[in-house]
Amino acid sequence: MAQEPAYFEFLCRMGDNALVLGHRLSEWCGHAPALEEDIALANTGLDLIGEAQLWLGLASDVEDRGRTADDLAMGRDVWDFRNHLLTEQPNGDFGQTMMRQYLFDAWHVCLLDALCDSSQAHTAEIAAKTVKEARYHLTRSRSIVIGLGDGTSESHRRMQTALDRLFPYVGEFFETDSIDRAMTASRIAPDPNSLKDPYLETIRSTFLDATLCVPEQEFYLSGGKTGRQHSEHLGHLLTQMQWLQRAYPEASW
Amino acid sequence: MTVSIEKETEQTRPALDTVWTWLESLNDPEIPVISIIDLGIIRNVAWSGDTLEVDVTPTYSGCPATSFIAQDIEALLRKRGIIDLRIRKILSPPWTTEWLSAKGRVQLEKYGISPPQSSGRPRCCPLCGSTDVIKVSEFGSTPCKAQWRCRTCLEPFDYFKCI
């Protein structure tokens, strides 16, 4: 297949988004404001790490150089990660975590829905499997964003602060580069920019119900999915996530 | 005993119906009242030459029980004398709670787990039968369950998520 390096890169982007956000959610384990929320965050994280295994497993097959999904997850350093900046942002308070989750879930569902029609059967299969889980995540994150946004004055203030802080990372979802153009040309994946309008329409309607104001700005931060420049937070995350494999290379059970 | 079974099956390939019956004896490690057949995760069993192929689909993509189930299948079939065995992980079509058998649904409810409903909410409390139930959380003790509570008997219970 002519576009193999681009396809590998695309699969790493898919896998790294799920992996990094899944790890972020796992950081809540034992710390969430209520037991039920603790369990819900850990379960959402588990679904995402399962999704990451599928995408990185396929990336490993496509690359065909003997690197396994685990090698990709645990053996690469910051500059080789291809997740969006949004997913690596710190958890903050529970409201900020749920705002990040909602902004991600709404995009994730749009993208996975489109990938169900991918010209690559394996990509379409993974999308069809994981979109069901992503839809379930979206139902929950949406209702929490609305509940807290349209809640007390304190919860409203915190949710608006979270939205203002995280909204500048949304633009990166729709940025198109040469990898995306190769994926679009071979009908493996949709043009990221084609998801922008449906996405914005979805989140505006949610934020209306949540009595939150969507920032009116065009400026956005990027550099995560291309690997050009991650935020400082990813390195700290990897020191935790990859500690065991780096201290005890090739450890397994 | 084991030796004689192995000897016997080395010569004849067991019928697929027999293999299905064997698999029926394996239960989900997390929900020990329901067999993996009633859970709907065994998608196909077939002979490919002298190799027995078993197609398994995960319930949730991150569910840790999936790999334990594959190990259980392998252990069981090896004990039954199957030498050439291939367990394939199948993603498509994705698992749906519609594949839970009627028997499996009854078993779940008896065990105290409310079976999935297309309405997205439990039919009734599996403990006392009351329909006055409320959702506590979309997630529960395993990836496939949510937490609900009965307002009549006041007990919390698991509800099998509908996907």
Image: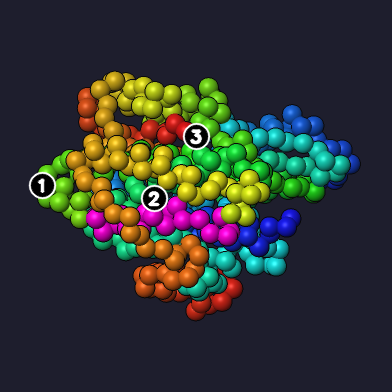
Q: Nearer the viewer, residue A188 or A218?
A: A218
* SS assignment at label 2: helix
Residue A222 versus residue B81 in the image, above or below: below
Extreme residue toward the left, this view: A153
Both labels 1 and 2 in a single chain: yes
Which residue type does callout 2 highlight? Phe
Image quadrant in which you'd find residue A243: bottom left
Q: Is residue A153 left or right of residue B77?
A: left
Which residue type does callout 3 highlight? Val
Question: What residue is shown at x 66% (from left), y 43% (from top)?
Answer: A119
Residue A104 is labelled as: 2
Task: Check disc 3 and report the residue beneath it.
Answer: B33
Look at discs 3 and 1 and give the one toward the viewer: 1
In the rendered image, residue B50, in percent from the top left (x then y), is placed at 85, 43
Question: What residue is shown at x 50% (from left), y 65% (from top)?
Answer: A226
In the rendered image, residue A167, in percent from the top left (x then y), is placed at 30, 54
Numbered circles on residues, count: 3
Residue A180 versus residue B139 in the image, above or below: below
Can residue B57 be seen in this snapshot? no
Report, in whole angstroms, how far the alpha carbon at label 2 lies from the one at label 3. 37 Å
Residue B82 is labelled as: none
Look at discs 2 and 3 and give the one toward the viewer: 2
Which residue type does callout 1 highlight? Ser
In the rendered image, residue B113, in percent from the top left (x then y), is placed at 40, 32
Report, in whole angstroms, how far the alpha carbon at label 1 lies from the one at label 2. 25 Å
Q: Is residue A160 left or right of residue A22?
A: left
Report, in whole angstroms, how far the alpha carbon at label 3 lies from the one at label 1. 47 Å
State the predominant SS element of the stretch in magenta: helix
Q: Find the magenta span and give its range.
A: A162-180
Magenta stretch encompasses residue A176:
yes
Question: What residue is shown at x 63% (from left), y 60% (from top)?
Answer: A6
* SS assignment at label 1: helix
